[in-house]
Image: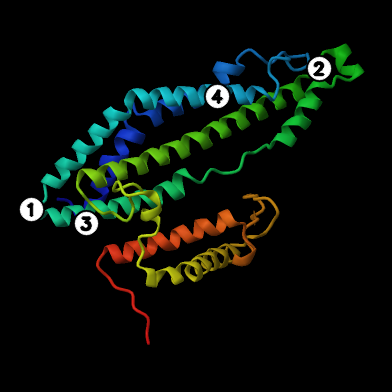
């Protein structure tokens, strides 16, 4: 086996989902790249105001069409992809002389998959235009001055509006696509955890126990650690961001490095606290799952 064994596992899982020519992600990306042709080609009426059929509300129709197309792809191909992923991983595991070592490497690749999903798929840069800006551009494109009416020269505002609307629609679809791809990849982690009977700390539905029991499977003596550990996770994240030049802002703005979560842990919304708590719980599970014990000094 090559030195980087976990990379082979990662590629065996991610390939059929993201990179194969007929993978849902590749096919949906192609549709994403064709949005301007499918919905806007020939719609720019040079010298006139914007086409009434191409208003901001078209974004909802595009999103609905995109989601419907994606669901159809997954419905038709999900089982096939799952079988291919399982077969790929079986071949890799069979190449090991020590099955326990193979499962350790596989579990390590699960961790890499989890980080990949969080960093590469769940994060989507903010759109160039928000709804308010689109409304302003739309109003400008509809407004025709007396001079423009005479000369037929309203091209600039019309074209700017169409380009902004296309960019916003593509951004919205890309956000949905990446998040759905991330969910599907983590679903493969669950499938493989069951297939190889692994109690992986990265799996979300390893067994058939009630969800409430799965959430509380930490030893009770460790439960008091969750909240202070979540606070520490947030503090480290906040300190790193501030060192990178980020400051507080009511709304996130990547260009200006503004973020609404750059506040003390106690001031975070509850859903943000839950995110840090989950990170803490999964970290504790990972430590315990690898045979380590956590004890408090007396």
Badge 2 element = loop
Bin the neighbour count of mark 3 within 10 Å (Cα to Cα): few under 14, some 14-19, many 20 and up.
some
Measured Cα–Cα span from mark 3 to mark 1: 13 Å
Q: Residue at x 60, y 21 (%)?
A: 61
| Residue annotated with mark 2 | 153
Mark 1 or mark 2, earlier in chain: 1
From what the image shows, is residue 278 above or below residue 224? above
Find residue 97 and name its label: 1
Bin the neighbour count of mark 2 within 10 Å (Cα to Cα): few under 14, some 14-19, many 20 and up.
some
Mark 3 or mark 1, earlier in chain: 1
Q: Quadrant of residue 24?
A: top left
Measured Cα–Cα span from mark 3 to mark 2: 67 Å
Q: Residue at x 57, y 44 (%)?
A: 125
Q: Are marks 1 and 2 in contact (CB under 8 Å)?
A: no
Badge 1 element = loop
| Residue annotated with mark 3 | 104
Question: Considering the image in quadrants, where does the C terminus appear?
Answer: bottom left
Q: Are marks 3 and 2 in contact (CB under 8 Å)?
A: no
Instruction: Please give left or right for residue 190 compared with residue 29 in the image.
Output: left
Q: Residue at x 21, y 56 (%)?
A: 104
Bin the neighbour count of mark 4 within 10 Å (Cα to Cα): few under 14, some 14-19, many 20 and up.
few
Q: Nearer the viewer, mark 1 or mark 4?
A: 4
Mark 3 or mark 4, earlier in chain: 4
Badge 3 element = helix
From what the image shows, is residue 279 above or below residue 19? below
From what the image shows, is residue 124 above or below residue 295? above
Mark 1 or mark 4, earlier in chain: 4
Measured Cα–Cα span from mark 1 to mark 4: 49 Å
Could you say where residue 141 lies in the image, as x and y percent from the top left? 78, 23
Residue 281 in sight in this render: yes
Measured Cα–Cα span from mark 2 to mark 4: 34 Å
Find residue 64 and name its label: 4
């Amino acid at each position: 086996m090559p030195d980087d064994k976990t990379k082979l596992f990662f590629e065996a899982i991610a390939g059929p989902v993201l990179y194969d020519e007929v993978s849902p992600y590749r096919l949906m990306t192609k549709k994403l790249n064709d949005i301007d042709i499918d919905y806007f080609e020939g719609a720019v009426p040079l010298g006139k105001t914007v086409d009434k059929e191409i208003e901001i509300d078209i974004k909802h129709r595009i999103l609905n069409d995109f989601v419907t197309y994606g669901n159809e792809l997954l419905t038709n191909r999900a089982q096939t992809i799952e079988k291919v992923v399982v077969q790929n991983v079986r071949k890799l595991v069979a190449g090991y002389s020590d099955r326990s070592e193979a499962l350790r490497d596989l579990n390590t690749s699960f961790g890499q998959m989890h980080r990949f999903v969080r960093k590469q798929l769940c994060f989507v840069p903010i759109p160039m235009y928000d709804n308010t800006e689109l409304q302003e551009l739309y109003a400008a494109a509809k407004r025709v001055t007396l001079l423009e009416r005479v000369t037929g020269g309203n091209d600039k505002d019309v074209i700017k509006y169409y380009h902004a609307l296309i960019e916003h629609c593509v951004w919205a679809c890309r956000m949905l696509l990446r998040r759905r791809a991330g969910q599907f990849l983590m679903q493969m982690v669950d499938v493989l955890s069951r297939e190889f009977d692994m109690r992986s700390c990265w799996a979300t539905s390893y067994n058939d126990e009630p969800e409430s029991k799965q959430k509380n499977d930490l030893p009770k003596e460790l439960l008091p650690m969750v909240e202070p550990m979540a606070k520490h996770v947030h503090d480290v994240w906040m300190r790193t961001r501030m060192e990178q030049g980020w400051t507080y802002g009511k709304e996130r703005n990547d260009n200006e490095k503004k973020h609404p979560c750059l506040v003390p842990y106690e001031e975070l919304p509850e859903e943000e606290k839950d995110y840090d708590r989950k990170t803490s719980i999964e970290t504790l599970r990972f430590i315990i799952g690898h045979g380590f014990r956590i004890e408090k000094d007396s």
